[in-house]
Every structure is written in structure tokens, then in C-alpha cells.
């Protein structure tokens, strides 16, 4: 009986070894699968630049578009190109695209750099404006070649100073006031301008009778015509000419002598509602 018991012990040991080998094999398989998942390639996708910094001409039909692109420790941009989205007529409409893995932060492309896309036009630009990615507008008029001039919020050819709504809009945008500031009470002679600017100070609750919803801060601004448009001189909450004459004695009394202090609710026309 003893000899029989001794013969069974090697078999039990062999069984334990086999079980241990299976467990180790399972661990190895799980580890290999995890490493394979981690090594999955990061996809490269087509995207547009975060910004356009400038456009210049090389010759009469080659456009060079400087853009913002992802950058990092590794290569982050491929296939940077600029194409016309439609035949050139009065305007050259350009779209810039590239391929990048920057949508995944694991790519390392978490910084921003600059790159230039090149476009061969089918015909000379010949004075046409250039619109890049539907928003960045450039013109050759008034530019210093080979660069094109970037147009501002009022377009490539803003209205000159004068007593017109477009000119008053330019004055509002030249003033250090919040967006959607309204204007009223304009008095102008072509060289000098005074108008009241009103900024909503309460919460956005249109239609609510709560006085807090209609609270506005109103100030009176004085301007002088300059080469680039209306130039702000000073601001006041008082009537008459006293405050502007402290800054600019030449401001004509005819435009300010009879002015009462600006009314709290006086200016309500947002420049978004004016031409």
C-alpha cells in the first residue's frame, strides 16, 4: 500500500505544474493583448487651419498662404494644400486643408506653428480680392507688394469719415466699448462728431419688466476725423462743451453747446442693427 501511495505523488505534482503553466500562459496572453491595444496607430484626419496669418503673391499667379498648423515633437502635418473652391470671377475663393493626428493628444501635436500653402492660380490675380476659408479677406488695393492687405471688420473699403450711418458705425468700432453697444444723438459736420453710446449693464432678459434688465450705462463721446476714420477724443456724462474743450479747444461749439447730459435710456440702436 505504501509503495502504491508513493507512485501517486509524482502524478499530483505533474498536475500542479500543468495548472501553473496554464495560468502563466493566460497572463501572458492578456499582457500581449494590452500591448497590442496600446500600439494602435493614431488616425490622421483632414482639417483646416486654426487661423490665416497672411497672403502674398509670387509672380502674378502664385498665392502663398501662411496659416496656423499643429506642431510638436513628431511630424504633425502632411498634405498641406490650398485650392480654389470655384472658378475665379470677381473674387478668388481659397480653401486650405492638411492631414494631421492632432485630434488625439497622444500624438504629441499639442502646440501650434506656421506653415505656408502654395496655390497656382489659373490666371493672374489681376486686382481680385482673396477670401481664405470663407472668413479671412485680403485685397491688393492699398497693400505693399508682394503682401496682400487683410481687410477689417468693416470690409476692405470702409466708409470714409462723414455724416453717414456707416461712418458712425466705424466710430463705434474705433471706441473702447463692449460689443453690441448702441448709439444715438449723432451731431456731425464732417470733421467733428459727437454721439451718445449706450451699453446694457443688466442681465439678458428681454421682455422682462424688471428694471435690472434695462439698465444701461450711457456716455457721450467726441471724435475728430482722421486719415483712417473717426478718432475718439474724450468721453463725458455731462452736458455742453466743457469736458471736450479741456481736451480739444477747437471742437465746434455749434455741436455741443446746447447738449443736455446724456439720458440713461437714450441710446438703444445696436450697431448690428445699423448699416
Image (tube, grey):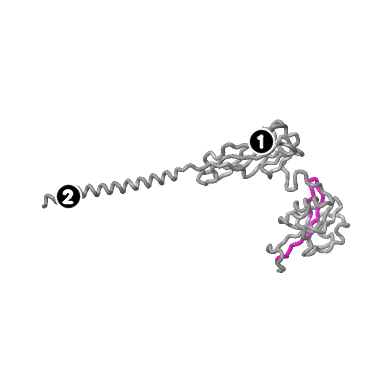
Point out the tag, 2 or 1, that comes first from the N-terminus.
2
Query: Where in the figure is residue 127, as x and y percent of width and height?
Result: 75, 36
Q: Distance between the residues labelled 2 and 1?
A: 85 Å
Q: Is mark 2 on a helix, strand or loop?
A: helix
Which of the 4 image quarters holds residue 261? bottom right
Residue 223 falls within the magenta-colored stretch:
yes
The residue shown at (71%, 39%) is 130
Question: Is mark 2 in CB contact (under 8 Å) with mark 1?
Answer: no
Indicate which disc residue 64 carries.
1
Picture quadrant of residue 62: top right
At horizontal 42% and vertical 43% (from top left) the residue drawn is: 36
Q: Residues within 10 Å of mark 1 (few under 14, many from 20)?
A: many
Magenta-tinted stretch: 213-233
Q: Is residue 185 left or right of residue 215?
A: right
Q: Is residue 2 left or right of residue 180?
A: left
**Residue 219 image offset from top left, x and y in percent:** 77, 60
Which residue in the protein does label 2 denote? 8
Q: Residue 231's spot in the image, x, y percent?
A: 78, 51
Residue 32 among magenta residues: no
Which residue is found at the position 46% from the left and 43% from the top?
40
The image shows a total of numbered marks equal to: 2
Amino acid at each position: 500500500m505504501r509503495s502504491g501511495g508513493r507512485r501517486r505523488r509524482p502524478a499530483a505534482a505533474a498536475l500542479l505544474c500543468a495548472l501553473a503553466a496554464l495560468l502563466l500562459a493566460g497572463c501572458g496572453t492578456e499582457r500581449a493583448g494590452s500591448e497590442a491595444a496600446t500600439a494602435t496607430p493614431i488616425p490622421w484626419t483632414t482639417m483646416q487651419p486654426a487661423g490665416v496669418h497672411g497672403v502674398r503673391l509670387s509672380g502674378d499667379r502664385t498665392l502663398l498662404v501662411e496659416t496656423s498648423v499643429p506642431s510638436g515633437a513628431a511630424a504633425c502635418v502632411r498634405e498641406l494644400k490650398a485650392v480654389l473652391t470655384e472658378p475665379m470671377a470677381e473674387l478668388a475663393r481659397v480653401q486650405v486643408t492638411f492631414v494631421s493626428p492632432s485630434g488625439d493628444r497622444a500624438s504629441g501635436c499639442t502646440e501650434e506653428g506656421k506653415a505656408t500653402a502654395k496655390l497656382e492660380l489659373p490666371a493672374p490675380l489681376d486686382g481680385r480680392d482673396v477670401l481664405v476659408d470663407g472668413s479671412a479677406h485680403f485685397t491688393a488695393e492699398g497693400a505693399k507688394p508682394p503682401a496682400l492687405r487683410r481687410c477689417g471688420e468693416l470690409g476692405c473699403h470702409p466708409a470714409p469719415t462723414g455724416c453717414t450711418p456707416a461712418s458712425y458705425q466705424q466710430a463705434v468700432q474705433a471706441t473702447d466699448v463692449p460689443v453690441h453697444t448702441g448709439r444715438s444723438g449723432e451731431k456731425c459736420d464732417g470733421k467733428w462728431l459727437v454721439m451718445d453710446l449706450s451699453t446694457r449693464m443688466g442681465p439678458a432678459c428681454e421682455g422682462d419688466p424688471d428694471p435690472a434688465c434695462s439698465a444701461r450705462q450711457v456716455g457721450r463721446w467726441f471724435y475728430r476725423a482722421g486719415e483712417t476714420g473717426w478718432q475718439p477724443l474724450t468721453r463725458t456724462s455731462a452736458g455742453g462743451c466743457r469736458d471736450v474743450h479741456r481736451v480739444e479747444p477747437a471742437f465746434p461749439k455749434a455741436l455741443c453747446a446746447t447738449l443736455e447730459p446724456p439720458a440713461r435710456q437714450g441710446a438703444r440702436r445696436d450697431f448690428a442693427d445699423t448699416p
